[in-house]
Structure formats: C-alpha cells, structure tokens
Amino acid sequence: MVSFGANEMIIVLLVIFIIVLLLSVLNPAKSLEESRRNRVKDLIVVGLILWFSPSVKVAGMVIFFYGFGILLYEKYQEGKREALGQKDSG
C-alpha cells in the first residue's frame, strides 16, 4: 500500500485544485471568438504559474484575476447580445 506524507498530500491536493480551477475557468472561454479565447487562456495560465511561484506571487494573482475579469466581461457581453437579439426577434 502506498502511503503519502503530509508534503506529498499537499502537493496532490494543490495539483487537483489547479486542474479543477483551470477546467472551471477555461471551459466557459470555449464560446468566445478565437483571438479573445486565446488571450484569456494565456493570461489565466500565466497568472496561475506566477501565482504559485514563491517570488512573484502577487504579480501572478494580478495577471490571473485580470484574465478572469476579461473572461467575465466577454461572457457578459455575449449574454447581453443574445438577450437583446432574442428581444428583437420575439
């Protein structure tokens, strides 16, 4: 049987957290147009990498949340266009 120490368990949980976070953030970006989708994905991934680096943690958080903010804004605009389009045709 494999036994994990405290450090190994923290690393496994951190990796699982990062995977879940990436999937939950990048999945909604699929419906954006390609150039915006790539920009959002790049900012989020680079932000996460820097966020978990000990020396540039704050910079990583700022970049990650900037990318996440762009994603939220784009999804808001997408929903707004859909809602206005449905009102005009309905």
Image (tube, rainbow, N blue to C red):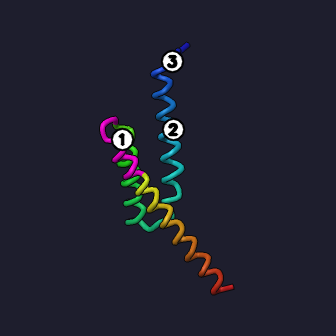
- Position above or below: 16 against 26: above
- Crowd tier of the residue under label 1, counting other residues whose Cα lies within 10 Å: few below 14, some 14–19, many 20 or above: some
Residue type at the position of mark 2 = Phe
The residue segment tinted magenta is 54-64
Residue 15, position as x, y percentages in the image: 47, 35
- Side (left or right) of 72 relative to 62: right
Q: Main secondary structure of the magenta part?
A: helix
Q: Where is mark 3, residue-wise?
A: 4
How many other residues sit within 10 Å of disc 2, few (<14), some (14-19) or many (≥20)?
few
Please name the residue shown 40% across and 47% down the image.
61
| Separation of marks 3 and 2 at Cα, in angstroms | 18 Å
The residue pinned by badge 1 equals 57
Instruction: Pick out the residue farthest to the top.
Output: 1
- Furthest residue toward front: 58
Q: Secondary structure at mark 2?
A: helix
Tag 3's secondary structure?
loop
In the picture provided, is 78 more to the left or to the right than 44?
A: right
| Whole-percent x, y for residue 67 in the image | 41, 57
Element at label 1: helix
Residue corresponding to mark 2: 17
